[in-house]
Amino acid sequence: MIPDPATPAATPSFALAYMHQDCPMTLRQGLAEYHAMIPDLVQEAALTDDALDLFHHHDVAHVVFGCDTSIRHEAMVDTWTVFGTDVGVGEYLAYLKVPEAREVLEDAGYLKITWLSGLAVPAVLRVVRASRRMTKKWPWRDHDAFLDRPLREIREEFGIELVP
């Protein structure tokens, strides 16, 4: 899910277990921890099917690639998604047509996002390099079989090296 645009984004916290390379918790547990760090989620009932689909897969990517909800990490998870998953850049960019996704961007402020994303360029470049070292791409959609597998095993299988 996504944070309610009316509340500030969660503060980055590397104390979260899912953000550590060798995390023993399962993907399902990591998702629960990720959702718990977001103070006010937009209610699922208020979202369209396209938005639910996007935000669910995006949340999974946050956990698999060890990212929080800061703008820096949002830039990183978007980069991981484009280079480290099987979604493809065209399909991922098509999500910008989802009204709820555009609303989140507008509420955060395009200028602020652009500025902070620019500051994230070194980390984004490290993500591009790390994604090229992956042994296979993470499945954007078909990842239910991984929900009860430990994150460290998933990361080992896919060759995912988290970028701090």
Image (tube, helix red, strand yellow):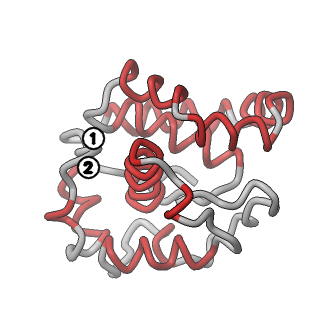
Pointer 2: residues within 10 angstroms few (<14), some, or many (20+)? Answer: some
Q: Name the residue under label 2.
A: 159
User: Residue 51, percent across and down?
Assistant: 47, 46
Task: Between residue 127 and residue 31, name the one nearer to us.
Answer: 31
User: Compared with residue 148, is residue 118 higher up or lower down, i.e. above or below?
Assistant: above
The answer to the question of whether label 1 and label 2 lie on touching residues, with beta carbons closer than 8 A, is: yes
Give the percent coordinates (x, y) of residue 110. Answer: 79, 29
Q: Which of 79 and 3 is in front in this view?
A: 3
Q: In this view, does 69 lie above or below 41?
A: above
The kind of secondary structure element at disc 2 is loop
- Say which quadrant the C terminus sits in: bottom right
Q: Which numbered marker is on residue 24?
A: none
Q: The disc labelled 1 sits on which kind of residue?
A: Met
Image quarter for residue 146?
bottom left
Instruction: Indicate which disc, 1 or 2, sits on the residue closer to the N terminus.
Output: 1
View extreme (top): residue = 90
Task: Name the residue at 32% across, 71% down.
Answer: 27
Q: Residues within 10 Å of mark 1 (few under 14, many from 20)?
A: some
For this rendering, which residue is in front, 135 or 100?
100
Q: Which residue is the site of mark 1?
A: 134
Estimate the x, y position of residue 1 in percent, counting from the top left.
52, 60
Secondary element at image label 1: loop
Measuring 60% from the left and 60% from the top, which residue is drawn there? Answer: 68
Q: From this viewpoint, which residue is outermost toward the left?
A: 145
Q: Quadrant of residue 41?
A: bottom right
The span from disc 1 to disc 2 (Cα, nearest Å) is 4 Å
Amino acid under disc 2 = Gly
Q: Is residue 109 above or below residue 55?
A: above
The x, y position of residue 128, in whole percent, is: 46, 31
Residue pictured at 37% horizontal, 80% vertical: 29
Residue 107 relative to residue 70: left or right: right
